[in-house]
Image (tube, grey):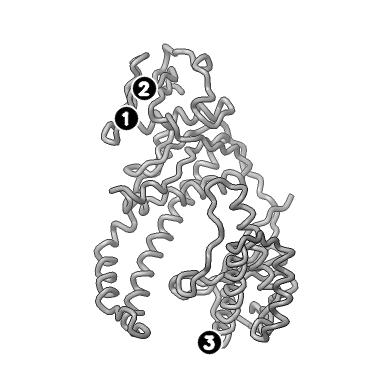
Amino acid sequence: MDELVRYNFRLRPGRAAESALLAEWHRCRFLWNEAVNLQKSGNKPTFSKLSKLLTEARGRNSWLRDGSQVAQQQTLRTYAQALAQSFTVKGRGRPKVKLRKMTPVSLEYTRRNFGIRDGRLVLAKGVSIPVVWSRELPSEPSSVRVTQDSLGHWYASFVVRRPTESAAPAHGGIGIDWGVRVTATTTEPLFDLPYLGHRKRCAAELARAQRTVARRRRGKRGPQSRGYQRAARQAAKLHKKAARQTQHDSRVWAKSIVEKYELIAVEDFEPKFLAKSSMARKAADAAIGAGKRELIVHGKRAGRKVVLVRPAYTTMTCSRCFARAKQQLELGDRTFRCHRCGFSADRDRNAARVILAVAERGHTRVDDVRHSDHPLRTGDPNAV
């Protein structure tokens, strides 16, 4: 059985190729913004309607015909999918206008619009770009996405098919509770993910670079100087270095858990509210969302059972008798004490055991589990 995966490679475009890519991106961005304006006017643009509008727009504007029709169609298809998800997925916002200086470059090409010749990526309209091949592709790519990051580096993401790797058999389950002081607390202390603080270690250097950026900024008086651009690039380098370190550590941690356990119960935690609290900087450095995403992706790829458990009342519930605390625990209370059975444990460790107990019984939240499912145990107080 094969699976669809992405293989990412660095691109080294010359000045002519980079200019062509940026021009293509501005055409696609124009079409995206036109679709947003059409939706704001009261119409619901489907992909078929947008395709007709694209044909008419290319007939009227010669500068649109200078670009790739496939890339422009893919932009409108992505918009139609994003709009459809905004109606079906709760909390998903409508597609917004893509600003020129605030939106990263992203171009999508299908199989009939690109090729690989002599180690180079050849796009529509004869754009040829050298690729840094760090590994071989397992099969012919079906599509490619060309992107540019905040540092100006270009990347190609190929969609390919590869045989599914069978994971080694595993047994048992593990519960995972997210936090700030400790990024991930599990039912097995050996697999805890501590707060590593990569951004905290480079905070002084980052603050110095940001002060240089602020000092060299001209405001709205014309283009920024080269000194400002160098300082902004240095600050972006530090941010990206810390993000890559966090992603690498999260990936290694996720793989170690997937190799060991068959059932992975993950707290379905949304860390957005932390951005408005005093823990915003530390929570952003911990990158809870990145760790959660790596765990889900690797778990499903290995064929493990990954259960997302809602975080409501997991901290207030006893993992031994499933009795709920009378009062909500404050952030300073790091020890959970049960008023019914007298069980006492670390607050986050107890929550991780509750999450695992809920997932073992086929539920996704604490309220779905009856007290009769958890008889009071007189044996090991640490048992789930």
Residue picked out by circle 2: 325
Query: What x and y, as percent, mark residue 158?
Result: 64, 66
Using the rendered image of the protein, determine whether residue 184 is visible from the camera's viewpoint.
yes
For marks 1 and 2, give the CA distance: 8 Å
Give the mark nearest the N terminus, 3 or 1.
Answer: 3
As helix, strand or loop, the secondary structure at mark 3 comes to helix
Q: Nearer the viewer, mark 3 or mark 2?
A: 2
Query: What x and y, as percent, mark residue 272?
Result: 41, 48
Q: Are marks 1 and 2 in contact (CB under 8 Å)?
A: yes
Q: Is residue 60 above or below residue 197?
A: below
As helix, strand or loop, the secondary structure at mark 1 comes to loop
Q: Residue at x 55, y 45 (%)?
A: 90
Residue picked out by circle 1: 329
For marks 3 and 1, give the CA distance: 59 Å
Amino acid type, callout 3 = Arg
Determine the image quadrant of residue 263. top right
Q: Are marks 3 and 1 in contact (CB under 8 Å)?
A: no
Q: In this view of the protein, which residue sits in the foreground, 1 or 95?
A: 95
Residue picked out by circle 3: 15
